[in-house]
Amino acid sequence: MKKQLSVALLSLAALLMTQQAFAVQTCAQKEAALNEQLGYAQQHNNSHQVAGLKKALAEVKENCTASSVRQDAEQDIEKLQRKLKEKQQDLQESQQDLQKATAKNNAEKMAKYRGKIAEKQADIEKITTELHQKQQGLRALN
């Protein structure tokens, strides 16, 4: 029972961390997240992680501005848009390949391309979700 509960909690934590990774973080949020990780690393006597987190925290305090956060978000959005376009092109190619395999009645290739299509559709859905979250975060900054 404890094992199932801890697995469920870890899954929930991973989901929340994934959603936070998609979101645009302000400088204050970045500092808070680093401080939280720093406290955790200190509790567990992880000196290498503590050193790295202290360095990252100092860099955020020194370099993070509202305009740099906006610029980073805009770059992330552009990157995701390129990635989405590439995946959509890949999907079209796989759909064309499936049509060719269907015309030849090649069951093995049909199954292969159906799997590829499903995988690419899942990738597109994930990228689209991330893109929408980044766009919402950017709008919230403005």
Image (spheres, grey):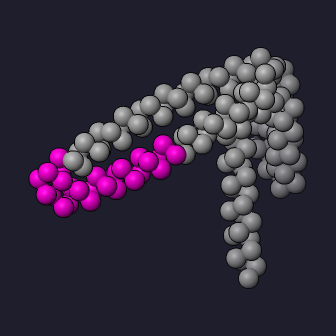
Indicate left or right for 50 with 129 as reference.
Answer: right
Q: Residue furthest top?
A: 67
Residue 97, given in percent of the width and then of the height, sits at: 23, 45
Residue in front for this viewpoint, 86 or 60: 86
Residue 90, given in percent of the width and then of the height, sits at: 35, 38
Residue in front for this viewpoint, 122 or 25: 122
Residue in front for this viewpoint, 66 or 85: 85
Q: How many marks overall?
A: 0
Q: Is residue 59 visible?
A: no
Report the quarter where the N terminus lies: bottom right
Residue drawn at 18 percent across, 51 percent down: 101
Indicate left or right for 67 with 74 as reference.
Answer: right
Report the quarter where the C terminus lies: top right
Residue drawn at 41 percent across, 46 percent down: 120
Q: Relative to 63, does residue 42 appear above or below in the rendering? A: below
Within the image, what quadrant is residue 24 found in?
Answer: top right
Residue 26, given in percent of the width and then of the height, sits at: 81, 30
Which residues are the magenta region?
A: 100-125
Within the image, what quadrant is residue 67 found in?
Answer: top right
Indicate left or right for 80 with 48 as reference.
Answer: left
Indicate left or right for 137 with 40 as reference.
Answer: left
Within the image, what quadrant is residue 139 found in?
Answer: top right
Q: Relative to 84, does residue 124 appear above or below in the rendering? A: below
Task: Examine the residues drawn in magenta and state their main secondary structure.
Answer: helix
Residue drawn at 13 percent across, 57 percent down: 105
Q: Is residue 85 visible?
A: yes
Query: Is residue 48 found inside the magenta-colored segment of the image?
Result: no
Residue in front for this viewpoint, 10 or 134: 134
Q: Relative to 1, does residue 42 appear above or below in the rendering? A: above
Q: Residue furthest left?
A: 104
Residue drawn at 69 percent across, 19 percent down: 71
